[in-house]
Image (cartoon, rainbow, N blue to C red):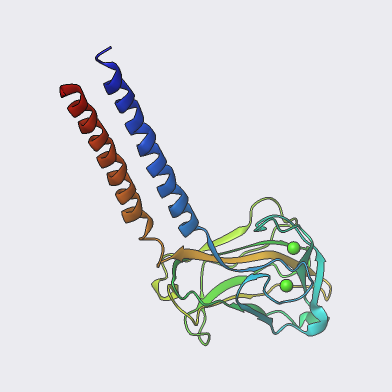
Amino acid sequence: MFLRPHLRLTRRIPFNLICALLIFLAASKAANADELAVWNFNDSDLNVDHGSGTLTSNLNVVNILFAAGTTTNARQGDPAGQALSLQGGTANANNGRNLTWAVSTAGFANIVVSFATQGTSTGFNSNQFQYSLDGVSFVDFNPPYTPATAFGAVPLVFSLAAIAGLNNNPNAVFRIVFNGATSSTGNNRIDNIVVEGTSTATATIPEPTSALLLLTGISSLYKMKRRRDRHKRH
Ligand SMILES: [Ca+2]
Ligand SMILES: [Ca+2]
């Protein structure tokens, strides 16, 4: 009889702790998953589909096409739809040309760029990913990549967290320089280009909020216990 109220109280503390923890985890997860720009190509154009950014290419316009896409790296429930399909062009004219996307990272850090890609045997097979801090000079990042023959389940991911200059940068630009095409119709498909980062504004908010929640929860429990003890004494 005497032990019961204490038992109930100690059972309640973990419940409150768990609630505060869950709120904290939910808040940090939201802060970690901010998509700044997404291109899904489902409307067969170069306009951004979620967020904001500008995508351009200096390939010959006739070699910028759209073909069946994938859900690999798709966001916000986007269907596979269409993908960008880039061809080598007459006399492989598009070797050395690029796809470039400008996305402001203002207010964000830990920038990650990812996309799904596949290539035909005579398509571009030596593609260099680059970034730029000012939209003028571009820096190679990682060695050139060769697209797989099918999209597969795993996107290409370029984690740029170590490039401090890309954090909070309104002039951030990303680029793929294509090379190695050996026929006019050899091609690369690209789908679900995503630029994401961690919000520097909200990343620090959840911690104090959760700490406050924890303290509020614990102090109210402590007050309840004191009130109960006082009742028992009287
Ligand atoms: Ca698509
Ligand atoms: Ca679009």
Residue 80 placement: quadrant = bottom right
- The C terminus: image quadrant: top left
Q: Quadrant of ligand 1?
A: bottom right
Estimate the x, y position of residue 60 in percent, counting from the top left.
77, 84
Residue at the far top: name it.
Answer: 1
Residue at the far left: name it.
Answer: 233
Report the front residue among 153 and 170.
170
Estimate the x, y position of residue 86 in percent, counting from the top left.
76, 73
Estimate the x, y position of residue 11 in percent, counting from the top left.
34, 26
Residue at the far front: name it.
Answer: 234
Answer left or right for 185 relative to 4: right
Above/below status of 60 relative to 80: below
- Residue in view at x 49 percent, y 65 percent: 197
Residue 36 placement: quadrant = bottom right
Asked whether the viewer can see residue 89, the reply is no
Answer left or right for 80 relative to 30: right
Estimate the x, y position of residue 33 in percent, counting from the top left.
52, 58
Asked whether the viewer can see residue 51, the reply is yes
**Number of on-image labels:** 0
Answer left or right for 16 relative to 169: left
Report the front residue among 11 and 100.
11
- Residue in view at x 20 percent, y 32 percent: 226
Report the front residue among 48 and 183.
48
Residue 201 placement: quadrant = bottom left
- The N terminus: image quadrant: top left
